[in-house]
Amino acid sequence: MSKKILVSACLLGQKVRYDNGDVPCLDPRFLKWYEEGRFVSICPEVVGGLPTPRPDAQRQGDRVVTGAGADVTEPFAKGANAALKLANEHDVALAILKQDSPSCGSLFIYDGTFTDTVVAGEGTTTELLRRNGFKVFGEDQLDEIERELALVDGSQ
């Protein structure tokens, strides 16, 4: 049996993003994994208690704040913990999370200045998952994910 994959709900076409949008991943490999029933989906921000739509938020060090300055660190932490719990419950092989997100970014996030500047960094959920031994990738890293899944599925 193939191992499960934790995935950002917005990548599956669910309208959970801050702007009430989605960003479905239409790569054939991603769709194949979906059809195989491998995905366990979550939007950490919604699970953490934030509404859709919601104000845009960005990481500023260990805090997450909205453009208006409201501190939303607590719901982001709650969502990250829920994602970790889900990953553990389903014994996921890895996670595919939305790049650039303050929750899910795995290589890049916005820099916290609300000037559309992207910097190297990771979101709160990615950080927690990685600290607990999970490999996290963005939707733009499907080649790496494919290689990792071949290793994981082959070792079962």
Image (cartoon, rainbow, N blue to C red):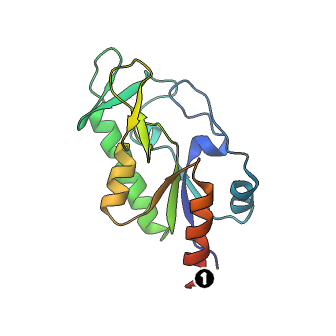
At a point 32% along the width and 64% down the height, the residue shown is 132
Q: Position of residue 148 (x, y in %)?
A: 55, 69
Q: Nearer the viewer, residue 99 or 103?
A: 99
Q: Specify the farthest residue to the left.
A: 62
Relative to 51, residue 37 above or below: below
Q: Is residue 136 left or right of residue 152?
A: left
Residue 101, horizontal then vertical, whole percent: 45, 37
In the displayed structure, would residue 74 be above or below residue 92? above
Identified at 58% across, 62% down, the residue is 145
**Observer-nearest of 85 and 96:** 96
Q: Quadrant of the N terminus?
A: bottom right
Quadrant location, the C terminus = bottom right
Question: Which residue is pictured at 43% across the width and 21% down the height?
Answer: 55
Q: Amino acid at mark 1?
A: Gly
Q: Quadrant of residue 5?
A: bottom right
Label 1 Cα neighbours within 10 Å, binned few <14 / some 14-19 / many ≥20: few
Total marks shown come to 1
The reply, left or right, for residue 38 in relation to residue 84 is right
* Residue at the disc numbered 1: 154
Q: Is residue 138 visible?
A: yes
Residue 133 in picture, x, y percent from top left: 35, 66
Label 1: state its secondary structure: helix
Residue at 63%, 39% in the rendered image: 14
Q: Picture coordinates of residue 93 (x, y %)?
A: 51, 69
In the orientation shown, which residue stands out farthest toward the bottom? Answer: 156
- Nearest the eye: 15 or 102: 102
